[in-house]
Amino acid sequence: MRVLPRAALSLQKNEYLLTVMAEGLDALLLGLLYSAARLHFLFRSEDAAGIWQTRVSFRSPALMDGQWHTLVLAVSEGSFSLTTDCGLPVDIMADVPFPATLSVQGAQFFIGSRRRTKGLFTGLLRQLVLLPGADATPWLCPCRNAKLAVLSIPRILQGLTGKPEDNEVLKYPFETSMKVTLGPRPPCTEAEDAQFWFDAGRKGLYLCVGSEWVSVLAGEAGRPGDVGVFSEPALDYVEEHQSLFTDSETLGIEVFAIPEAGLFIATANRKATSTIYKWTDGKFASYQDIPTHQAQSWRHFTIGKKASLHSETFSIFLAVANFEPNEKGQEFSVIYKWSQRRLRFTPYQRVPTHSARDWEAFEVAGEHFLAVANHREGDNHNIDSVIYKWNPGTRLFEANQTIATSGAYDWEFFTVGPYAFLAVANAFNGTSTRLQSRLYVRLAGCFQLFQSFLTFGAADWEVFHIGERIFLAVANSHSYDVEMQVQNGSYVINSVIYELNVTAQTFVRFQEILTCSALDWEFFSVGEDYFLVVANSFDGTTFSVNSIIYRWQGYEGFVAVHSLPTFGCRDWEAFRTAAGAYLVYSSAKEPLSRVLKLRTG
């Protein structure tokens, strides 16, 4: 937590930072008590001899200096550790251990008090973080520099010193009139300064500071710490916009726009025909059927300058990854080219592939590439995937580099400064899904190994940026080994988000999220908010599994905010039109995809 004790007057009494009080009784179950000399952690102890209160006391550091301070208290069964301002921790081994179980049924949680006026905290407190079963120090203190412990703090609060003006008397909180306004958003003027407004519809609490309402309690449309949350749209809820019936189960979708033609979505269908739909009158309508062979995914890309659609140097392509051979036993995937005359995609180039799962198109230093994820050849999953390079002379893609993969499922390309990276999701080596997925960096004209990640049936990589930070998320689908007995729980496993540590030049684990045979991540934004949605496909028992939207909450990472009923969910895509923002997902278990509209406030 971050605290700013009263500095104007010397502290003459004990003040509670937080308490947990038993239901209907003035009995303290848990508390943190602050005095001029000490910081006390209080908890209820109980055995056959009776019930009593245990106090663990730390010598209080010099906190009453008018500055913000970070306090981190870590509690385990027999030890208690206090870290102040990201310094060295002070550890105490108590005679009385913290109880292994502490019932809080019906209890009430109080911040800055213990339910009565006596002992009220008279300073300021912000960023109270509770982490069960974990030490919050690494989250709050990235280094020993206390200044870096400032997390997602509203800018307008960073200027508060906690000191009164020369002609102002510092009042105790219980001496200050407090007014909470309900209903629609009221004005925030000098008359409402320091007053609260509770938005019952969004369940958000806001404080009037100056002329702006500042979010102090997260509602469904805002984050704690947002300033001016009303100036940008925020995600309120998700509603179904269209049921998109397909010829068969759909394993992948690709949303793309063609200048002067419109917005399209290509569905990779399991049976012999895949379909391209066009956005017409606010919904997708069938536009073109294309023969495919258990198509897994589509990839849209362009080559050349976009000065004119009719220019011979500008081309629009759509590549399909075919998983099965054709009727003649020939195994290949196909690149289609957009015909400006016919306003349709026509076959352009066949590329030999082996149970292809994915295409990734990218450009490096003006040169164009296509990488195919070859999943297996016969029963052999340990085969080469291939990177193809565009030859401007022949205007065809030619093999440029092979990379050894194991049941490759997905490629993801991204750049960091002048460096180009390519990540592969390795899913299965023939005996196990517990594999190293790889990240390659392009040096000296080819991709070379940069970093390896332990993954479990990796099905997708998703790279995204939040400010200057770069993240890489992997979707883990299944923990399986041929020597182990298959268990239903092996599908409910953690997927992982990594963050690039520029100094260490490596991606480090940032957050683990429990998923149900995750097959895809999709990153998108609404206003100033950032989101990740996961395609949960199977929990070991049923394909009717909720997929989850997670919202970026700063130091908390991604937090679940919406649960979406899906059936065998395989792929997510986010897109925008003039009418708003949408999500669309495909099902690998039924011939029905769904378009969802993101309602904003």
Image (cartoon, helix red, strand yellow):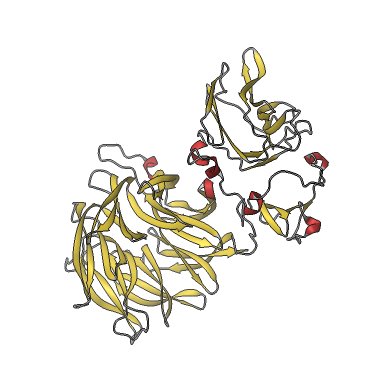
For image coordinates 77% across by 47% down, the residue present is 165
Q: What is the quadrant of residue 443 in the picture?
A: bottom left
Which residue appears farthest toward the front when viewing the image?
Answer: 166
Q: What is the quadrant of residue 271 in the picture?
A: bottom left
Q: Is residue 166 left or right of residue 106?
A: right
Whether residue 249 is visible to the viewer of this picture, yes or no, is no
Front residue of 94/49: it is: 94
Whether residue 373 is visible to the viewer of this picture, yes or no, is yes
For image coordinates 23% across by 47% down, the residue present is 429
Quadrant of the snapshot with the N terminus: top right
Residue 600 sits above or below residue 52 on the image: below
Residue 581: x percent and y percent?
A: 52, 67
Residue 421 sits above or below residue 84 on the image: below
The number of numbered discs placed on residues in the rendered structure image is 0
Quadrant of the snapshot with the C terminus: bottom right
Q: Is residue 71 left or right of residue 492?
A: right
For image coordinates 25% across by 71% down, the residue present is 334
Residue 30 sits above or below residue 536 on the image: above
Front residue of 15/404: it is: 15
For image coordinates 45% across by 46% down, the residue present is 513
Residue 590: x percent and y percent?
A: 40, 60
Residue 539: x percent and y percent?
A: 42, 46
